[in-house]
Image: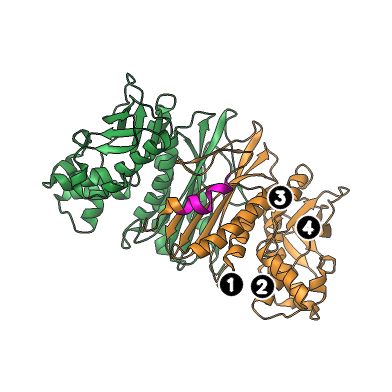
Chain colours: A green, B orange
Amino acid sequence: MPMDEFALIARYFSALGRGEAVTLGVGDDCAILRLGPDEQLATSVDTVLPGVHFPEESLPEDVGFRAVAVAASDLAAMGARPLGMTLALTLPEADELWLHSFSQGVAAAVSALQLPLVGGDITRGPLTITVQVLGAVPRGQALLRGGAAEGDGVYVSGTLGDAAAGLAVLQGRYRPEPELAEYLERRFFRPLPRLELGIRLLGSATAAIDISDGLLADAGHIAAASGVQLQLQPELLPLSAALLAQPDREQALRWALAGGDDYELCFCLPAGVSAPGDCTRIGVVAAGEGVSCAGAEQLDIGYRHF
Amino acid sequence: MPMDEFALIARYFSALGRGEAVTLGVGDDCAILRLGPDEQLATSVDTVLPGVHFPEESLPEDVGFRAVAVAASDLAAMGARPLGMTLALTLPEADELWLHSFSQGVAAAVSALQLPLVGGDITRGPLTITVQVLGAVPRGQALLRGGAAEGDGVYVSGTLGDAAAGLAVLQGRYRPEPELAEYLERRFFRPLPRLELGIRLLGSATAAIDISDGLLADAGHIAAASGVQLQLQPELLPLSAALLAQPDREQALRWALAGGDDYELCFCLPAGVSAPGDCTRIGVVAAGEGVSCAGAEQLDIGYRHF
């Protein structure tokens, strides 16, 4: 290890490891975490790279927050209670200014999501950030993609398309009012995975997924895993004021249907079961396959994939 | 995702996910794993990079095996029972020949270590391989670094220095007989983490660590965490026939003391407790700090750090 990995970890990351489930954090061969006797482990891993998952010139603090939030969203989609995470960081050099700022973003996410950092690895190389999240679900109750049934309603949380619009703002492709621009950029850099909502949906949702690749793509995963068709009505999509301010209505719809990166949840509920607040019914589950979305054919958003 | 991540995962990795503890493998937002009611989760993450952790020209099959084995060694060092792992792969391009070979190495490790692959992420970027391992330890019994006490014996498993000698062979710095060269290269590329030994040491070892950075460095971690001194006798170090064939005895000792990468275990046992077969007593725990090793001062192996 060309840089002193141990000193860097101690300085920037060791304080982020406290949590209810953490028996042993950073500093031994493994971290040790507790689960309840009737719980199972839920785990997922996500890598983010500059220029692919975030603009090269992003603030390290935003990069750190977002890397954790993106990974934690998979826990939300399963209804898992956060236990902890590990972080594998490959860095071109031991840039302490970068590490200081990055670790502050990680710390903000640890605090916001109650997801302690229990282990990690720092290596010298091209910048890659890999976050592995660990959560606990009540035995046999994890929210899967495969349970949607004909007649279920299809729902999403929050508003859609904001992060894609935020990226357009960052890239100079969309120039709304400054306060709207700030809101949209924040939605891109500081997504808040719906961990509480996921846990609340345990026992009622028949299927769930987080919206990372875009609503059409992610709804398509539910359709494929459940062997059903999800029929969406684009006029029902929940849009923020910032997106409604976009004069090009088709562009706003494109962001909401295919933009992704909002890390909201898409889920299905049996008829008669009411959705939690902040969630919107956007369609219905029917016999068939794939996703149907009247009007989306004209939007040139790669709709052929579905 | 520029390449079709889902197709690549399905083709090369989805079959590697079967295991006793795996309730749900690759294909949903998270994998779901079972632990026993009296178990805790042990987890660790390791990244390996070309040119840093393995020679650039290594066979992808060897790279895949070694990346998994290196990460799994941390489970062995805690006495953890393997549950599963995730793999985050960043690749310059969707090179199917590379992926085919690499996945065969991963498959060989999955099989040898009984460590199913339950999740992952493939991203386009510079080659980095991050493996996160998940294991289960009996509640409160994990082998830590911090329990060594005065009078304990210090032990290592297997033989030391082989992997460092193997790297020297790969780099043309050491040219033994062909069959010895082959053995040493294999010890570098195909380490077998001591998972069974770790489990067997539960309840008897007072401290344990895997030898990844070199015996002196790793014994130093036990000394620091336990607040004791580890007094090692270099003439007791177990050396393979291939290392004993090295005419430069000091070079062989340097490999054994500082080479690392063997992924054997270093552990402490109370006086009177006998070590499992294939393990060698190499010293004793005394009052003080750090590692003492008579004669190592002359070997120019960065001994000043200890």
Q: Say which mark, if any, is on residue B55.
A: 1
The residue nearer to you, when weighing A157 against A112, is A157
| Alpha carbon distance from label 1 to label 2 | 9 Å
What amino acid type is highlighted by mark number 4? Ser
Viewed as shown, does residue B14 lie left or right of A165? right
Q: Relative to A249, is B303 above or below?
A: below
In terms of sequence position, does the residue under pointer 1 or pointer 3 come before the other? 1
Does dot 4 land on a helix, a strand or a loop?
strand
Q: Position of residue B283 (x, y in %)?
A: 82, 60
Q: Relative to B283, is A83 above or below?
A: above
**Pointers 2 and 3 in contact (CB under 8 A)?**
no
| Disc 3 target residue | B195
Label 2 resides on the chain identified as B
| Alpha carbon distance from label 2 to label 3 | 24 Å
Q: Say which mark, if any, is on residue B84.
A: none
Label 1 resides on the chain identified as B
| Disc 4 target residue | B157
| Alpha carbon distance from label 4 to label 2 | 20 Å
| Alpha carbon distance from label 3 to label 4 | 12 Å
**Pointers 1 and 2 in contact (CB under 8 A)?**
yes
Q: Say which mark, if any, is on residue B167.
A: 2
Viewed as shown, does residue A173 lie left or right of A45? left
What amino acid type is highlighted by mark number 1? Pro
